[in-house]
Structures are given as C-alpha cells and as structure tokens.
Image: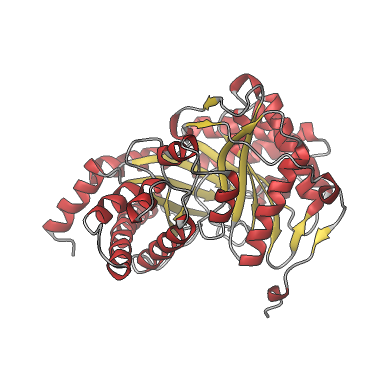
Amino acid sequence: MINVFEVNETNKMIQQENLDVRTITMGISLLDCADSDLNKLNENIYNKITTCAKDLVKTGQEIEKEFGIPIVNKRISITPIAMVGASACHTPEDYVTIAKTLDRAAKTVGVNFLGGYSAVVSKGMTKSDELLIRSIPQALAQTEFICSSVNVGSTKTGINMDAVKLMGEIVKETAEVTADRDSLGCAKLVVLCNAPDDNPFMAGAFHGVSEADCIINVGVSGPGVVKYALESVRDANFEVLCETIKKTAFKITRVGQLVAQEASKRLGVPFGIIDLSLAPTPAIGDSVADILQEIGLERAGAPGTTAALALLNDQVKKGGVMASSYVGGLSGAFIPVSEDQGMIDSVLAGALTIEKLEAMTCVCSVGLDMIAIPGDTKATTISGIIADEAAIGMVNQKTTAVRVIPVVGKTVGDTVEFGGLLGYAPIMPVNNFDCSRIVNRAGRIPAPIHSFKN
C-alpha cells in the first residue's frame, strides 16, 4: 500500500522537481496490413492505427487528471515500414505515400509523434530497405509527426558499412530539404546500433517483430528529482551517493508502473515495458548535466564526467529494476545537447566537445543525440561519426545512436532554435579531417569475437 508520506513525496516531485511520465507509447504491429496493392496497403495501415489508438490520447489525459501525474506525450510506434511495404513499394515515392498516410493517422488520433518509418539493415539491405532509406528525406520534409530510424549494426552481425555510408548522405539530404526549418527533419531521424524492439522514446522507437500485436510501453523521466535528492548528500561518500540515486530511481519507476498498469487496463492492451530513462528537457532544473555537476563536476565535460555518468546510469538501472518486473527499452541517462540546458551551458563554456560526448556514450543510454553541427559538414564525415558510434555499441553490447543535425547556413558560433522539447543548440565543431576512404570501402565490419555466444 502507498502511505500518506509517499503520496506527499510524489506530489512534491511533480510540482517542484519536474517529475513526469514522458510518454505513453502504443506499439502496433502492421504486419497484417501488408498488401501488394499500394492503395490497399495505405488503407489497411490507416484503419489499423486509427482503430487501435482511437482512445490512446483520451485515456492518457484521463489518467493525468485523475492521478495528477503529468503525461507529456502520447505516441505510437509501428512495425518497421520497410518490412510492411516490401510488396507494394517499388520506388522511394511509393514509400512517401505511406509516410503521408501515417502522418494523417497520427493527426487523426492526436498523438505527438509516430515512430517506425524505419529499416533494420544491420547485416544487409533488401531492395525494400534501400527504397525506404532513400525516401526518408522527402518523407520527413512532407510530414509533421513522423519519426524515422535505421539500425545499421549489432553485436551479433557487425556494422553494415554500406548502410553507414548511405545514411551519411541521407542525413545530409534531409538537412537540405528541410533547410527552411533549420534542417528540422534531422531532429526526427536517428541511426542506431543494437536498436531495442520496445523503445518508447522518439526518434528511435519502432515496434519490433518479436512484440505482440498491440502493447503499451511507458517512458518515465525525472532528472530534476535525482538532482534534488543528491543535493541532500552533497558531501557524502560513494556508497551514500549510489543508494540515494537507486532509491530515487525506484520511486520514479513506481510512478511509471502505476500509469502503465492503468493505461493497459483501460485500453484493454497488454503492458509491455517501463523505460526509466533520465530524459532531460530545456526546462531549468530538468537536466542530466546538472546531476553530473551535483556529483562533483564544475561542468559536464570536465575530467571525471564519464565516470560520473557511468555511476549514474548503473544506479538508475539498479533502482528501476526493483520497481517493475518489466523494465526495458533503453533505461538509463540520455545526454542530448539541445534538450538539456546544462549540456548547452557546458558547450558554450568550452567544457564539452563532440569527442567528449562520444566517450560518454560508452556508458550512457544511447549516443550522440540532438547535436547541431555546421551545415557544410561532409556526408562522409557524418558517416564516420555514425561508424564510430556503431562500433562503440557493437563492442560494448549496448544501444548507441547518432542524431546529428547539419544545419544548412549555420556554422560554429551560431545557435539554432528547434522549439518545444527539442530546445535549442549551439553549432558544435566537428573534426573535418577526411575519412572518405574508410567510409567508401564496401561491405561490413565483422562482429566482435565476443558475439559468438550460443
């Protein structure tokens, strides 16, 4: 049973410390929508999404009102569209029609984002995969709610360098075709290694083939709560520090568990997972960088940052898994730049570089996230950044990702405003020494030796 003290404590977390349920994400399988007729396929997709998710937003709002817990986003993830559209789509333009159908369905049911305009090409690309990937720039330019992801590697299969090369070009093209919106399309495109099937967070969410027909996943976030808790143990040793983070993560996850169970019951949809990820927002006090500074750094990026982040990520997971039987997705600490005021401040102070962020991705939840770079960055340079991140994920058996935004017309010293949860970002410098020879080698980087576990 929950006692009065716990109720008051949770209310304080919500009102003063930015605790929220970041998203209720409904995962929907579209495998049964497949058809060789493109018009019929689009009709099937629209009908299934609008049927399954018709009450998603209303239910989220009711839970929010009844329990007093902010639920920031209501979202949908779907089967990677490259699988669903294989029979009907023969050109990139065919896939763009599906993107428009998905966008229309998302608007009809009222969700914030729909993820799954995706392909999984960690070992090789089918013709359908390649057509979808080549359609991504126009799909993101012509839609409002669609998020896209491409998984280019895994610990078991290695890194598909042909896909890595192509994705550098696609990121660049997406920036150019959305240049009138400060290359915003790239903020909805992520390149992954070891992508999980049950991630509720955008832009990397999709509904994996191992999932049920329809499920509810919940992503809960509370970096402000963790920072506040650590302020009371500022001079304590590591044992006390770790215990404080674990206990706080437990309390945060219980809030998510409550929301997930209620949403599952009311929608008549099975509960999937709780993703406990400390996902920051541009709001003051809702920052992962601030937690790292509370642990003992002058700025995020200072020597000791990777150690502090490793500690934080581990204790968040340890606390979360005690609070729910089904913790999944990514679960840990996100380090996006544009969405975290503390990260932005560290970049502006000269404490944080892309190279340091890359080192931090070895121990955080995902990878290089929401980083604005000069618009004239070469496609091969972007591919090199993707390859580096994929290698970190492959070797360390973890999810890594790249969501960089080469903002057309902007250079180092400029700032770009994305708005809302996407925030704003200073343009960060990248290493422009040429990597085209390695990027242009055809084929696949083999899986590491420790992948042969059976």
Q: Nearer the viewer, residue 162 or 285?
A: 285
At horizontal 48% and vertical 43% (from top left) the residue drawn is: 351
At horizontal 39% and vertical 54% (from top left) the residue drawn is: 264
Q: Is residue 272 above or below residue 284?
A: below
Image quadrant in which the N terminus is located: bottom left
- Is residue 115 visible in the rendered image? The answer is yes
Residue 356: image location, x then y, percent: 56, 50
Residue 34: image location, x then y, percent: 71, 47
For residue 369, what is the image quadrant? top right
Q: Nearer the viewer, residue 80 or 329?
A: 329
At horizontal 63% and vertical 26% (from top left) the residue drawn is: 411
For residue 323, what is the image quadrant? bottom left
Image quadrant in which the C terminus is located: bottom right
Q: Is residue 137 above or below residue 261?
A: above
Residue 183: image location, x then y, percent: 63, 27
The residue furthest left is 4
At horizontal 43% and vertical 65% (from top left) the residue drawn is: 314
For residue 123, what is the image quadrant? bottom right
Instruction: Tell whether 150 sits left or right of 426.
Output: right
Residue 327: image location, x then y, percent: 44, 63
The residue furthest bottom is 454
